[in-house]
Image: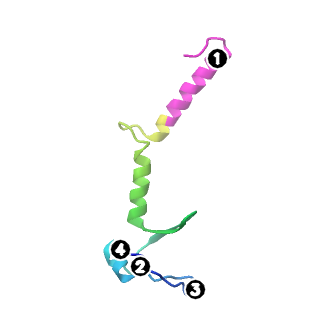
């Protein structure tokens, strides 16, 4: 898809080009996600946003162990090492 200029109307709405809507499956009533960033606006379909979230979460999922469990276990190890250091047992 090529760049396409769009105008904003007096109510802040833009019209997505028909070619884009067809290609991305955006229909009347479809939900899209708008993200404002340092480099401009990003418009994603809900499915695209969900796929992005799944990719992010998958980085923290390892062999059935959720990221929160990994973080908790890591923090417990750090805490144990700090505790041993306070009691003069040294660290490994």
In the image, residue 69 lies at what x, y percent?
47, 36
Indicate the secondary structure of the residue bearing disc 4. Answer: loop
In the image, residue 57 lies at what x, y percent?
43, 48
Q: What secondary structure characterizes most of the magenta part?
A: helix
Instruction: Find the distance from the CA under tag 2 to the CA under tag 3.
Output: 17 Å
Q: Earlier in the sequence, mark 1 or mark 3?
A: 3
Nearer to us: label 4 or label 3: 4
Instruction: Find the distance from the CA under tag 4 to the CA under tag 3.
Output: 27 Å
Please tell me the numbered disc located at residue 85. 1
Out of 76 and 91, give the one closest to the viewer.
91
Please tell me the numbered disc located at residue 1. 4
Magenta-drawn stretch contains 51: no
Tell me the magenta residue range.
71-92
Seen at 55% across and 87% down, the residue is 9
Indicate the secondary structure of the residue bearing disc 3. Answer: loop
Q: Earlier in the sequence, mark 1 or mark 2?
A: 2
């Amino acid at each position: 898809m090529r760049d396409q200029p769009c105008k904003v109307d007096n109510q802040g709405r833009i019209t997505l080009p028909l070619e884009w809507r067809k290609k991305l499956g955006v229909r009347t009533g479809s939900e899209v996600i708008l993200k404002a960033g340092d480099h401009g606006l990003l418009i994603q379909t809900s499915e695209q946003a969900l796929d992005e979230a799944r990719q992010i979460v998958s980085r923290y999922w390892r062999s059935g162990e959720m990221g929160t469990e990994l973080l908790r276990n890591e923090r417990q190890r750090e805490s144990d090492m700090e505790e041993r250091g306070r009691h003069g047992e040294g660290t490994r």
